[in-house]
Image (spheres, coloured by chain):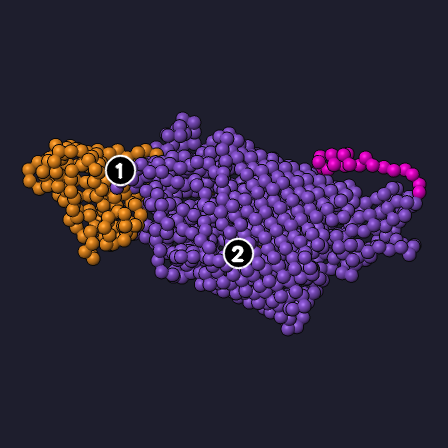
Chain colours: A purple, B orange
């Protein structure tokens, strides 16, 4: 509330008292439901012949008004006509809202015209359904990777983690149908558990500005939404079949929607995907297949003044991890790095064997909302269960049992209130409470993540103020309290090495042979804020300025890791003494949207204190040989960069798209570059699109990734008995720059208004280039993917 | 409105039941006793004729924990002596200690020991036991001590090696054990 008063005080200082008839009323017309702008609406000044029509951004302007009160009638083809009283005492700006009938909403979504803003002062990037369908055989991370400023941290080609402006894992929050994904996102080899085919729209916010979701999204927020359902009697659906040459894999996904004029609707969606071993240009990448299934159901009621819906999804993903990456010791790592080809190459197979992951994610959500005089109140309850099994190559009776078994249950309750304090001021506020429990059964291998319970409480308020037709201001604050209750077994030798036996002796529950059972109970208090402004130049240009402070509680992996991560043959150590990291991000975007030439340029600087990172620090000798030790540490980090997008239209059917990202990351305490920062990269695309020839679309894309020249030196030496020499294990050098070409084409056949067939054919890595990517964790062992032919057949009915 | 309320309450109640089913708050987690860890390698060198048995041992009781293995050699080899070697692997984290050699010998096709002799040390080794396909396994071996000298002897156990092979360089697989002993022949 305090913030709201502050905003009012700050911006209510314009008043005019003169009496003439040269005032202008300008404003914007939006949909009451979701804030999308309404184009082509008519505004009539009652008692006169004067009327104006809103433009494609929902804007209007009525000039030569006198200093009196006017009645303005607003009508739109799909909305109820509504009258507004406006008192004019100077040039006035008004934001009008109409209730949209949702009749055409689904089609509008397809056209990408809905602009629900999650953060009004950070530029949002969106990927709509049509584009997403090109990624139907790929992953969520691959789809996001097509946006500037997004890269991905990969483990092979099947585990793709989105990386936003250089940050990933716990620093990227994924909101799936309103639910914050709790899928053990801390691990670098844990992919988001979302089927790309269940998504209708994907929105990326590069920063922590969307405080209604979280206060710890240092990197950004990814918002995944399923389709809006129209309020009319209808039954429709689509089926898509995709086939890939590389991996010899296929996918089928289907969706059926029943809607009714009463507002009730139901949707059912399912995907089945199976891929065998992928191939690099010269060899098979053994054990890299995927077996994925997804089903989702949504039932709901959509009315203007109230509504509810229930969503359930079950995602199951079995992923093979390259056999060549499974190591026994640092000596093996040395052999792998110095070998030109993978250490293990077997014949192509669809079978998955160890090492592999088997992950199941269930999500159930119930949301209900009701509109009152003061605004829209919504209540949400969601439950998620994430079950992760990781299989390593094991011996004896343990062969075939998982090494890592984690069951993560999360319950959350959210209450949100969305009000319009006045025509120009919106206020969102809410409360979040969540309970999370991790259970790690005994697998005969020490637990990487301990059993724990986690309680979170959050409260936020975000307000925006449309000052005039040019300026919009936004301010928000959020406070989160996290309480963690953990049962963790420490190896006695480690407990003593870290002096925990002196500093944390109060945590000890029980001392066993070689092990200590401890119960850390920690509280974290995190505050986050956002302040921003948007300036609309009135023409094609718009400027976004945002400053956000985000705070993130260390995750269980950062705090409690202690021991050998078998599949990667490295020892990982966390630190009990970590505190929350705090990031300050300043971001500026200049955007030009024009029919012929559009661009956006987005410089940013993100300064993070107590930034937690993991990197190799040395070696540890054991009877199995030498292991590299990777330790988490806290430092002060700074990330700076520029994201650039441009699109130029040569003629009606030919366009050129350009995308580039430059990012630099530094450790300010050790004065060295940060590890795993994306190299400079650029994508250029020539697209031919002809609506006269059945929407024929041909696209040729070039993707150039530079060599990462700045990385910390984390190499270490090991002893090789055969040669009796000490050898350097080069784990820090980056691979060479590479240039890939991709081709994509599609054509649509409309049999009737409802029944449509689209065919698409594409080739990725057209020249079958051998390359390795710095951000792929398997770059030490094998080349990346070779050429892939892709065929998609989609039928809408 | 009634329909909506009814549906909402049914769904919500179901969710609550689903969510509260598996909570046992009081139980402490079960300690994990690592089953596959090899903490101890003992190689006994028993002279074929007269002489003392030499024991080589590498013991790492915290497994892959921060403590380094304790490596001991009971004495010096005698020049010209022939030794019957036997390797025993133990997991001493379990109580009683588990003999991992049994597992290695059962899965003989998936395992092979290699003996790497440092340049200074004048010894020769040969395999004394094979897997079921007649390729070397190496938990038993013969060591012949040459002239007085000293240097390193390394035992390497590879899991899933390429068999047959000509040595560590083309054996592939993963390293399960790599232990180096400094020996002296007098």
What stretch of residues is rendered in magenta? A1-20
**Mark 1 — on which chain does it sit?**
A
Q: Callout 1: 10 Å neighbours few (<14), some, many (20+)?
A: few
Q: What mark, if any, has residue A95 been given in the picture? A: none
Q: Which residue is mark 2?
A: A741
Indicate the quadrant where residue A105 lies.
Answer: bottom right
Left or right of A541, for residue A577: left
Name the mark nearer the viewer: 2 or 1: 2
Whether residue A579 is visible: no
Q: Indicate the secondary structure of the residue bearing disc 1.
A: loop
Label 2 close to label 1 by CB (< 8 Å): no
Image x and y of residue A319, in percent: 44, 55
Dot 2 falls on a residue whose secondary structure is: strand
Furthest residue in direction bottom, as rendered: A751
- Determine if the magenta segment contains residue A3: yes
Q: Nearer the viewer, residue A422 or A465?
A: A465
Q: Find residue B62 and report its image quarter.
A: top left
Question: Between marks 2 and 1, how big is the CA–CA gap?
Answer: 45 Å
* Residue A611 is inside the magenta segment: no
Q: Is residue A790 above or below residue A540?
A: below
Quadrant in which the C terminus of chain B is drawn: top left
Closer-to-camera residue (A303/A276): A276
Q: Is residue B51 left or right of residue B8?
A: left
| Same subunit: marks 2 and 1 | yes
Q: Residue at horizontal 53%, vertical 40%?
A: A455
Q: Report how many numbered discs are placed on residues in the image.
A: 2
> Residue under circle 1?
A724
């Amino acid at each position: 509330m305090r913030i709201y008063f502050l905003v009012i005080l700050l911006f209510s200082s314009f008043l005019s008292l003169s009496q003439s008839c040269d005032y202008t009323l300008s404003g914007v017309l939006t949909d009451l439901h979701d804030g999308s702008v309404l184009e082509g609406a008519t505004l009539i000044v009652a008692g006169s012949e004067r009327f104006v029509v809103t433009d494609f951004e929902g804007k209007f302007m009525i000039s030569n008004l006198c200093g009196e009160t006017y009645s303005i009638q607003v009508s739109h083809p799909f909305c109820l006509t509504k009258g507004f009283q406006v008192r004019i005492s100077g040039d006035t700006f008004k934001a009008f809202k109409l209730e949209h009938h949702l009749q055409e909403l689904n089609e509008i979504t397809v056209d990408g015209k809905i602009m629900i803003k999650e953060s009004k002062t950070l530029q949002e990037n969106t990927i709509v359904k049509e584009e997403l369908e090109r990624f139907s055989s790929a992953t969520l991370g691959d789809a996001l990777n097509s946006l500037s400023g997004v890269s991905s941290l990969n483990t092979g080609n099947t585990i793709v983690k989105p990386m936003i402006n250089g940050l990933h894992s716990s620093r990227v929050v994924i909101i799936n149908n309103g639910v914050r994904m709790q899928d053990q996102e801390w691990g670098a080899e844990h992919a988001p558990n979302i089927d790309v085919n269940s998504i209708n729209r994907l929105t990326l916010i590069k920063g922590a500005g969307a405080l209604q979701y979280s206060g710890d999204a240092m990197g950004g927020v990814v918002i995944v939404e399923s389709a809006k359902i129209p309020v009319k009697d209808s039954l429709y659906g689509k089926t898509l079949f995709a086939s890939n040459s590389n991996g010899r894999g296929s996918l089928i996904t289907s969706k059926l929607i029943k809607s009714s004029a009463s507002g009730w609707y139901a949707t059912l969606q399912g995907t089945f995907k199976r891929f065998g071993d992928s191939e690099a240009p010269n060899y098979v990448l053994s054990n890299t297949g995927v077996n994925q299934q997804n089903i989702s159901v949504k039932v709901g009621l959509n009315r203007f003044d109230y509504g509810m819906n229930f969503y359930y999804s079950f995602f199951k993903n079995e992923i093979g991890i390259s056999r060549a990456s499974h190591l026994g010791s640092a000596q093996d790592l040395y052999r792998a790095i110095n070998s030109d080809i993978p250490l293990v190459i077997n014949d192509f197979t669809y079978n998955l064997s160890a090492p592999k992951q088997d992950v199941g994610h269930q999500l159930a959500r119930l949301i209900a909302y009701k509109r009152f005089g003061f605004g829209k109140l919504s209540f949400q309850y969601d439950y998620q269960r994430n079950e992760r099994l990781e299989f390593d190559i094991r011996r004896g009776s343990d062969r075939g049992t998982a090494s890592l078994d984690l069951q993560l249950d999360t319950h959350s309750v959210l209450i949100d209130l969305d009000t319009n304090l006045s025509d120009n001021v919106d206020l969102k506020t809410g409360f979040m409470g969540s309970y999370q429990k991790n259970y790690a059964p005994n697998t005969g291998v020490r637990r990487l993540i301990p059993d724990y319970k986690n309680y979170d409480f959050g409260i936020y308020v975000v307000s925006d103020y449309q000052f005039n037709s040019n300026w919009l201001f936004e301010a928000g604050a959020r406070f989160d309290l996290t309480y963690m209750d953990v049962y963790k077994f420490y190896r006695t030798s480690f407990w003593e090495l870290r002096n925990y036996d002196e500093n944390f002796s109060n945590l000890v529950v029980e001392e066993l042979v070689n092990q200590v059972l401890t119960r850390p109970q920690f509280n974290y208090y995190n505050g986050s804020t956002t302040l921003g402004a948007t300036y609309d130049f009135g023409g094609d240009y718009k400027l976004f300025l945002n400053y956000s402070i985000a705070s993130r509680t260390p995750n269980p992996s950062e705090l409690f890791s202690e021991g050998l991560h078998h599949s990667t043959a490295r020892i990982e150590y966390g630190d009990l003494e970590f505190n929350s990291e705090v990031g300050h991000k300043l971001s500026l975007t200049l955007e030009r949207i024009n029919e012929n030439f559009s661009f956006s340029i987005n410089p940013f600087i993100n300064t993070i204190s107590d930034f937690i990172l993991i990197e190799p620090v040395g070696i540890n000798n054991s009877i199995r040989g030498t292991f590299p030790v990777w330790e988490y540490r806290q430092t002060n980090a700074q990330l700076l960069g520029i994201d650039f997008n441009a699109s130029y239209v040569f003629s009606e059917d030919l366009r050129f798209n350009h995308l580039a990202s430059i990012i630099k990351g530094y450790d300010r305490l050790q004065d060295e570059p940060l590890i795993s920062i994306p190299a400079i990269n650029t994508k250029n695309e020539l697209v031919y699109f002809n609506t006269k020839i059945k929407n024929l679309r041909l696209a040729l894309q070039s993707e150039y990734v530079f060599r990462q020249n700045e990385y910390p030196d984390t190499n270490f030496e090991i002893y090789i008995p055969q040669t009796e020499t000490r050898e350097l294990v080069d784990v820090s050098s980056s691979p060479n720059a590479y240039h890939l070409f991709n081709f994509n084409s599609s054509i649509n056949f409309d049999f009737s208004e409802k029944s449509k067939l689209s065919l698409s054919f594409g080739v990725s890595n057209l020249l079958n280039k051998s390359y390795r990517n710095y951000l792929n964790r398997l770059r030490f062992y094998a080349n990346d993917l070779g050429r892939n032919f892709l065929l998609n057949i989609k039928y809408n009915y | 409105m009634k329909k909506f309320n009814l549906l909402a309450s049914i769904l919500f109640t179901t969710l609550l039941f689903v969510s509260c089913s598996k909570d046992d708050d009081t139980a402490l987690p079960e300690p994990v006793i690592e089953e596959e860890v090899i903490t101890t390698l003992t190689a006994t060198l028993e002279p074929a004729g007269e002489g003392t048995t030499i024991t080589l041992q590498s013991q790492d009781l915290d497994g892959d924990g921060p403590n380094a293995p304790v490596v001991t050699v009971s004495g010096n080899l005698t020049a010209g002596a022939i030794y019957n070697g036997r390797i025993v692997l133990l997991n001493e984290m379990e109580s009683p200690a588990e003999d991992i050699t049994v597992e290695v010998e059962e899965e003989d096709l998936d395992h092979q020991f290699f003996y790497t002799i440092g340049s200074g040390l004048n010894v020769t080794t040969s395999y004394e036991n094979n897997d079921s396909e007649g390729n070397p396994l190496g938990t038993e071996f013969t060591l012949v001590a040459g002239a007085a000298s000293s240097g390193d002897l390394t035992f390497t156990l590879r899991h899933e090696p390429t068999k047959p092979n000509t040595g560590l360089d083309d054996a592939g697989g993963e390293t399960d054990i790599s232990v180096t002993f400094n020996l002296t022949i007098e």
